[in-house]
Image (tube, rainbow, N blue to C red):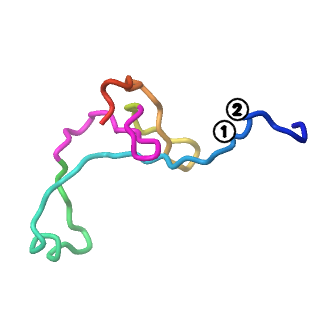
Amino acid sequence: MSANPNASDVVLDIGVQISLEVGRARMTIRDLLALGPGSVIELARPAGDPLDVYVNNRLVARGEVVMVNDRYGVRFTDPVDADSRR
């Protein structure tokens, strides 16, 4: 890299936060406080539906969970176009 990096080189090194959403649930504070070890929260999303992939809190794709050695990963299956992002 030269002493005067061009703008695109600088932008490519900026970190972003990637997060995955499996599903959501609503509950009362009473129900939340009643949770303990072994409690199960039922999510609104059906099992087998793809995960939502967010970059800096913007939906960019949908994907599926995969195993990479002994860690979880995500395989992008469906990019979300700019008009569909929430």
Q: Where's residue 47, x and y in %?
A: 23, 39
Count neighbours of disc 2 (C-alpha within 10 A) and say few if under 14, some if 14 to 19, many if 20 or more: few
Q: Where's residue 9, x and y in %?
A: 74, 35
Please report the residue visible at 14 percent of the width from the left and 57 percent of the height from the top: 26
Residue 18 left/right relative to 80: right
Amino acid type for the residue under numbered disc 1 = Val
Quick one: 83 or 39, which is closer to the camera? 83
Q: Which residue is mark 2?
A: 8
Q: Is residue 76 above or below residue 41?
A: above
CB under 8 Å between discs 2 and 1: yes
The residue tagged with tag 2: helix, strand or loop?
helix
Quick one: 4 or 37, which is closer to the camera? 4
Count neighbours of disc 1 (C-alpha within 10 A) and say few if under 14, some if 14 to 19, many if 20 or more: few
Query: Residues under labels 2 and 1: Cα distance?
Result: 5 Å
The residue tagged with tag 1: helix, strand or loop?
helix
Please report the residue visible at 41 percent of the width from the left and 41 percent of the height from the top: 54
Quadrant (top left/top right/bottom left/bottom right) for the C terminus: top left
Q: What is the span of residues highlighted in magenta in the rendered image?
A: 44-60
Residue 64 left/right relative to 44: right
Residue 85 occupies quadrant = top left
Q: Where's residue 84, x and y in %?
A: 30, 26
Amino acid type for the residue under numbered disc 2 = Ser
Q: Is residue 13 above or below residue 39?
A: above
Q: Where's residue 83, x and y in %?
A: 32, 24
Quadrant (top left/top right/bottom left/bottom right) for the N terminus: top right
Residue furthest toward the right? 3
Instruction: Residue 56: say if magenta.
Output: yes
Q: Which mark is residue 48?
A: none
Residue 21 left/right relative to 26: right
Q: Is residue 25 above or below residue 31?
A: above
Please report the residue visible at 70 percent of the width from the left and 32 percent of the height from the top: 8
Q: Which residue is mark 1?
A: 11
